[in-house]
Amino acid sequence: MTADTSTRAAASMPRGRELYVVLGSLMLAMLLAALDQTIVSTALPTIVSDLGGLNHLSWVVTAYLLAATASTPLWGKLGDQYGRKRLFQTSIVIFLVGSALCGQAGDMTQLIVFRALQGLGGGGLMVLVLAIVGDVVPPRERGRYQGLFGAVFGVSSVCGPLLGGWFVDNLSWRWVFYINLPVGVLALAAIAFALRTGSRRERHKIDYLGILLIVGWSVSLVLLTTWGGTRYGWASPQIIGLGVLAVVLIAAWVLVERRAAEPVMAPRLFREPVFSLSSTISFVIGFAMFGALTFLPIFLQIVHGVTPTMSGVHLLPMMVGLLVASIGSGQLITHTGRYKLYPVLGTPITALALYLLSRMDEHSSTLSMSLRFALLGFGIGLVMQVLVIVVQNAVPYEDLGAATSGVTFFRQIGGSFGVAVFGTVFSNRLASHIEDLARERRLPPGFDPSAIQGNPHLMDRFPPQVRQDVLHAYAQSIDTVFLYAVPAGIIAFVLTWFLREVPLRSTLKAQDYGEGLGAAPTARSSRHEIERALSELMRRDPRALDMYARLGAAAGLDLPAGSMWALCRIARDGTVGGGELAERAGIPREQGRPYVDRLVADGYVVRRDGDLLATGSGRDAAARLTAARREALAEHLEGWSPEDHPELADLLTRLAHESLGDDADGREIHASGGAHRASV
């Protein structure tokens, strides 16, 4: 990007109240998409009671996850190519239409189809929000705001199950979806009013066929695990056909990806052992997390008879454990540079927690269950986001974006499989236990287990012994679900020992640990990943006063920090009025005049008709400051070889240019007394 283009882009950025309206709207949209991954879990028993279709329960969650995961690469590249504002508005509309239709669903099949539509829009929301933040926020402030969006995922992880239960108890399960409508319309209106289109456009060769094949083999495998042993026997033509279809589609996908100009996931990534291992472990973590979130509310509401709202409250220890472990391990990695320890510890903790969950029954106390939930969340939190760091630290620059997207993709796919497999195991075991009870004549005539699942209070109609037998059957069935997941956790633990640990790159110490908390799919390019990391590192820079002092010394300029800031701002804008310059610095014009007078006296700036213009020597001085800033940023890219990647070199130049003369820097400098000398 040229300096003129950069200046025009900066000029189009929203400021002040307008910026806060845009960011608030983006956070609302992100919250909606993230919540819909978890908010349904506590409403599922009631949904099944109302619509029927116990065997399809897992697809209510799986349809959303698959659609969101598969669509993110498409949304990301279309946004780069055609502009993000319209694509973002389109994704909101699709999401809201899907939400409205979900609320109107008359049977389980309709709900599953509408959840897939909702997931298609949700994938666009999640991937475009962070891209738009990069368009509307100056580089040095992006890290702070991107961190806020990461926190949205943490909030959604904690609040999703609780809100879903509250809506079921106080309104209707349909309000789990209807609540999206007023919030989404508000976000849509605010974006239309406040967001100006000024983002860079990039041409892409979009891998449509690769995306369709991913959807095809994913759905085939999930259907295989969902129907196998329930609707159809494992040796039936339908199940064998699904297995053959999945293998054929995977083979076709590999061939297509080898030839694609911009593959969704380059096959060469799987030749990197760290990526293959991390993706497998990530799959297991998604498997455990979403499987637990789906079936623990069923256990709580049926076996223990708690309300949907209270089942969400019971899940809070799990989500708090996840938050504490994710953020805590992230902070420790930043300070120590060591990361292998956390998945090595987290995977056996997850396996142990799954085993302890399999030992719960109708007599388990609230305290014992809460401790087990917290242990599961803690184990998952130690692993989930760290795997992104492991992969990013191992791959070359050209594969950075694809590797990051890949490891989160497999976490989402793992979640889809986890819900599907857990659902199959649960249905099979429950049917077996109910048959045993019926054969032993311990059930009343016409007993309907799906009715009990939807409305646990029906248990009260049965004699105490019958009620106890049925509750025990449900407890045993769900216990088996978690017991069957234990081997997967053990396999992941073994795999973690083969992860290679190498010194942590500087950019990875700026990892946003909040973003992974909602298991959000990503679709950023390698350049976007580096730009995000550099933005966060710039946010962590020392005070602007000290930064300009260092840059001035490196550029050979003996000027106050306030004067250097003003020079960079004037050089960026070409021509700027004194009043406008003071407004950008957030100070009265009289307070800033001495810094500009110094620039005029030294021949760097001239006054003409009330405007300030940089002279030739002023532009040269600003260029030297920019070069010094570029060198300082380049120090963070050790191991990424910017000299071998023109787009990375261009990124350094652009960020150096955009981050000098920043409004926030001006306010900070003058609030600190910007006459600080460069020679200090």
Image: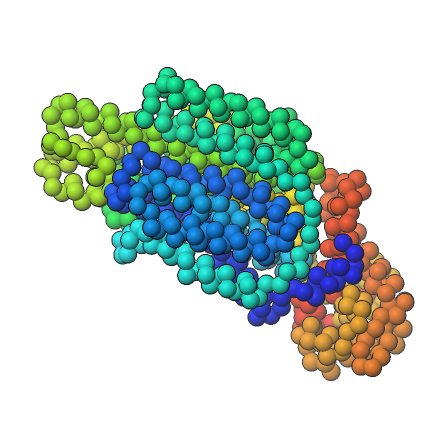
In the depicted view, which residue is nearer to us: 363 or 436? 436
Residue 410 locus on image (x, y percent) = 52, 34
Residue 479 visible: no
Q: Viewed as shown, does residue 419 lie left or right of 494?
A: left
Residue 486 locus on image (x, y percent) = 40, 28
Picture quadrant of residue 386: top right
Q: Is residue 615 above or below residue 158?
A: below
Q: Viewed as shown, does residue 342 lie left or right of 268?
A: left
In the depicted view, which residue is nearer to us: 622 or 454? 454
Task: Locate the C terminus and report the quarter of the image it occupies.
Answer: bottom right
Q: Viewed as shown, does residue 250 lie left or right of 310?
A: right
Image label count: 0
Q: Is residue 513 above or below residue 18?
A: above
Picture quadrant of residue 558: bottom right
Q: Residue at x 86, y 76 (%)?
A: 606
Q: Residue at x 33, y 23 (%)?
A: 232
